Amino acid sequence: MLVSTTELQNNFGKYLKLCESRSIVITKNGKKRALLLAIPPSANGYETAESDYSYGSAAHAPNPVTYREYLRLIEESGERYELIDGEVFLMSAPGVTHQRVLGRLFLWFNGVFIPGQPCEVFMSPFDTFLYRRPLREERDLTEDDTNVVQPDLLVLCDHADRIDDKDRYTGTPTLVVEIISPSTRSNDKVRKLDLYMESGIEEYWTVDPKTHGIAVYRFSDYLLEDDALYTTGQTARSFRFPQLSVPVDAVFRDARSK
């Protein structure tokens, strides 16, 4: 749903309520500028940010984590981490609901992206190296501009010639999927959305077992071009791949809801 900044200012209460059930894209001068998202209620009123998920300092802080420090951390600890804009995040072990939802999604995607075809689906853990491409217009990129993430599902269409001699994928996914959990909610819906948008990924799905919702975001020229929210009784559909559609109820069967 598109809303101008003027309309938002004049009817903020209305859109604060509406964002609980749909994505509100805020526009200025006809261009999409921001996304208004609701924080789901919890037993204490509202969920808080994932304070125990973060490890390092943010990129805008005086001492962001360097890429070499990140490599040393994962080598010494043996844990799985993500590196986003100079901040390191510990990957917690997924729960039963997460694994059920992931397995069902993979089966649906794998039925569309059959192995051996140009586009193929892969499942986490899968190191994905991303760079904010608009930065290249300001300066040369360095290794410390590297972001390393672990999407739950990835659709790769360039992997035939983007695998290095260590069997690591070095390209950019066409589509990524994140299954939201309490410890990753704000990262998946805000920080990663922004990173994926600016890294050249064309489509991003957030799959929320708590609300039984699937949000689909389409990016173009490093901006949000379109989005859709699918809930119970509906079928989530890809913008990028017309042949890809997933019934919401089939994904969240037996999943805990709010």
Image (spheres, grey):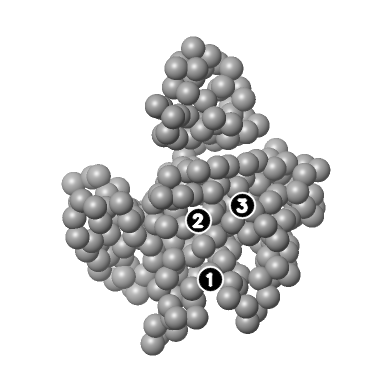
- Residue type, numbered disc 2: Glu
- Residue type, numbered disc 1: Cys
Instruction: Evaluate if marks 1 and 3 touch, with contact meaning CB atoms under 8 Å apart.
Output: no
- Residue type, numbered disc 3: Phe
Q: In this view, does 139 lie to the left or right of 51?
A: left
Marks 1 and 2, the one that precedes in the sequence: 1
Query: Circle 1 is placed at which residue position?
Result: 157
Q: In this rendering, does residue 89 appear at all?
A: no
Query: Circle 2 is placed at which residue position?
Result: 202
Dot 3: what SS? loop
Name the quadrant containing residue 111.
bottom right
- Image coords of residue 173 (percent x, y): 49, 65
Which residue is depicted at the point 48% across and 73% down? 158
Residue at the extreme bottom: 165
Numbered marks: total: 3
Q: Distance between the residues labelled 1 and 2?
A: 11 Å
Quadrant assignment for the C terminus = top right
- Image coords of residue 119 (percent x, y): 58, 72
Dot 2: what SS? loop
Name the quadrant containing residue 250.
bottom right
Q: Distance between the residues labelled 3 and 2?
A: 9 Å
Q: How far apart are marks 1 and 3 (CA)?
A: 16 Å
Q: Is residue 88 left or right of residue 2?
A: left
Q: In this rendering, does residue 19 appear at all?
A: yes
Marks 3 and 2, the one that precedes in the sequence: 2
Most foreground residue, 203 or 193: 203
Residue at the extreme front: 30
